């Protein structure tokens, strides 16, 4: 019998294999005997479908399934997210549109990837399309339309994105914010101080900002994933921005949409790219950077000075700490060096050596640590 309870759950789960595929699901039942019957019914259904007694689920084409996927995204996610997925599906359509989901094989995906690269597209652009395709096929597996995704087991590799993120130095940050228009300056300050995404800042309402709390924070209502919903501490440098925005707001949104010569306070702003490009030109910063790099600057500096990756992941609203580590892997060698220096200092202090020698060694270690922090902050 493969019926069990997961830790902390009152319900029984079934877990078994049929034709090499694992079936694991909650029965939503508290009675073990009835839960076992549900498992038996599921096994019988699979056997009957295999024998042709029950009709197999009709496998849709990629075009039809992607259309349903986009409808779900439009209903459940933000408009920007829907636009991004729509763009990816349009890119995937010529190669996979007429294919049934179970006809999409790893070699076909690899051919698509090579064809996109031949058009001189960046690895980041190609990876976005691949990520969209992987998500669509993953949903098809969950709905039991296909047995296994062609991405399973690393059979399709994503491209390496080299040097996409850029970390600003303190001088560059100050020059950029000085050259920025007032709205961009406020958004940029919040990004580099708190690590919020631009879209998350645009969506902030007065009721989301808790300035009077013992530890002021901003509540993010929605985002790219479930973990994007979170409370983010407001730093002392970002606090004046929020106070000014809340006190001057004439509607629910802190960053209203510009309409003609005025503002629509019932709708959030959606665009800052033109203002960002003007600030780059005015500041003369080279090489140029993306607005999103202000967020990356926050993460890089936080990891460099020793903030645990899990804490950074939670503040950023990442899906997992593993994603944070993968994105900021370039920071890890410096973290390892700092950790090694701290362990060395700790071991040296505990060793029975002469007092004068210990002073010299400790002074050297702390000096190296300060140099490392300064070096990391100037990236």
Image (cartoon, rainbow, N blue to C red):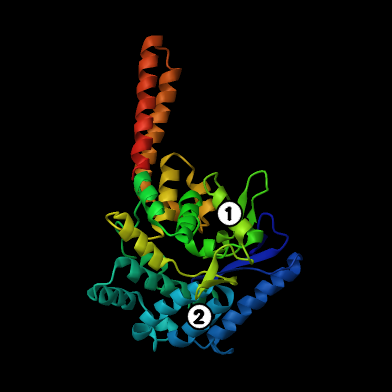
Mark sitting earlier along the chain (2/1): 2
Q: Judging from the image, what secondary structure is the residue with disc 2 in?
A: helix
Q: Is residue 19 visible?
A: no
* Position of residue 164 measured from the top left corner of the image (x, y, whole percent): 32, 59
Reply above or below: 57 against 164. Answer: below
36 over 287 or under it: above or below: below
Hey, which quadrant is residue 346 in on the image?
Answer: top left
Left or right of 150 in this view: 316: right
Dot 1: element: helix
Please give the label number shown on residue 254.
Answer: none
Q: Along the horizontal axis of the image, is 372 left or right of 62?
A: left
Q: Reply above or below: 377 against 278.
A: above
- As measured in the structure, the alpha-carbon distance from the residue carrying label 2 to the one carrying label 1 is 39 Å
| Badge number at residue 70 | 2
Q: Give the camera-side residue of 200 and 13.
A: 200
Few, some or many residues within 10 Å of mark 2 (<14, 14–19, 20+) = some
Task: Find out whether the residues at labels 2 and 1 contact each other: C-beta distance under 8 Å.
Answer: no
Q: Which residue is mark 1?
A: 244
Which quarter of the rendered picture does the N terminus lie within? bottom right
Estimate how packed mark 1 is, as few (under 14), some (14 to 19) or many (20 or more) residues with alpha carbons within 10 Å: few
């Amino acid at each position: 019998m493969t019926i069990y309870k997961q830790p902390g759950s009152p319900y029984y789960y079934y877990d078994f294999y049929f034709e090499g595929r694992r079936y694991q699901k909650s029965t939503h039942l508290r009675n073990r005997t009835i839960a076992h019957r549900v498992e038996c019914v599921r096994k019988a259904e699979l056997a009957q479908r295999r024998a042709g007694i029950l009709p197999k689920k009709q496998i849709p084409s990629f075009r039809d399934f992607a259309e349903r996927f986009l409808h779900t995204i439009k209903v459940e996610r933000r408009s920007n997210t829907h636009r991004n997925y729509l763009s990816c599906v349009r890119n995937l359509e010529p190669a996979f549109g007429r294919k049934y989901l179970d006809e999409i094989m790893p070699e076909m995906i690899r051919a698509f990837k090579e064809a996109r690269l031949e058009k001189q597209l960046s690895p980041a652009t190609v990876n976005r399309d691949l990520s969209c395709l992987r998500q669509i096929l993953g949903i098809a597996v969950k709905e039991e339309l296909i047995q296994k995704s062609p991405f399973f087991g690393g059979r399709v590799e994503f491209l390496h994105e080299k040097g996409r993120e850029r970390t600003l130095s303190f001088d560059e940050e100050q020059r950029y914010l000085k050259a920025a228009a007032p709205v961009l300056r406020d958004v940029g300050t919040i990004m580099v101080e708190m690590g919020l995404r631009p879209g998350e800042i645009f969506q902030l309402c007065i009721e989301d900002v808790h300035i009077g709390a013992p530890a002021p924070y901003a509540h993010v209502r929605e985002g790219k994933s479930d973990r994007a919903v979170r409370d983010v501490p407001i730093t002392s440098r970002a606090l004046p921005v929020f106070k000014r925005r809340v006190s001057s707001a004439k509607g629910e949104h802190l960053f209203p949409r510009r309409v003609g010569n005025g503002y629509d306070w019932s709708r959030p702003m959606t665009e800052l790219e033109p203002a960002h490009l003007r600030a780059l030109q005015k500041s003369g910063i080279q090489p140029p950077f993306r607005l999103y790099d202000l967020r990356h600057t926050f993460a890089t500096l936080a990891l460099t000075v020793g903030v645990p990756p899990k804490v950074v992941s939670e503040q950023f609203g990442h899906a997992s700490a593993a994603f944070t580590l993968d994105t900021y892997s370039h920071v890890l060698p410096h973290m390892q060096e700092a950790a090694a220096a701290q362990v060395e200092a700790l071991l040296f202090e505990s060793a029975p050596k002469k007092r004068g020698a210990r002073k010299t060694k400790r002074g050297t270690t702390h000096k190296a640590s300060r140099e490392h922090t300064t070096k990391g902050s100037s990236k």
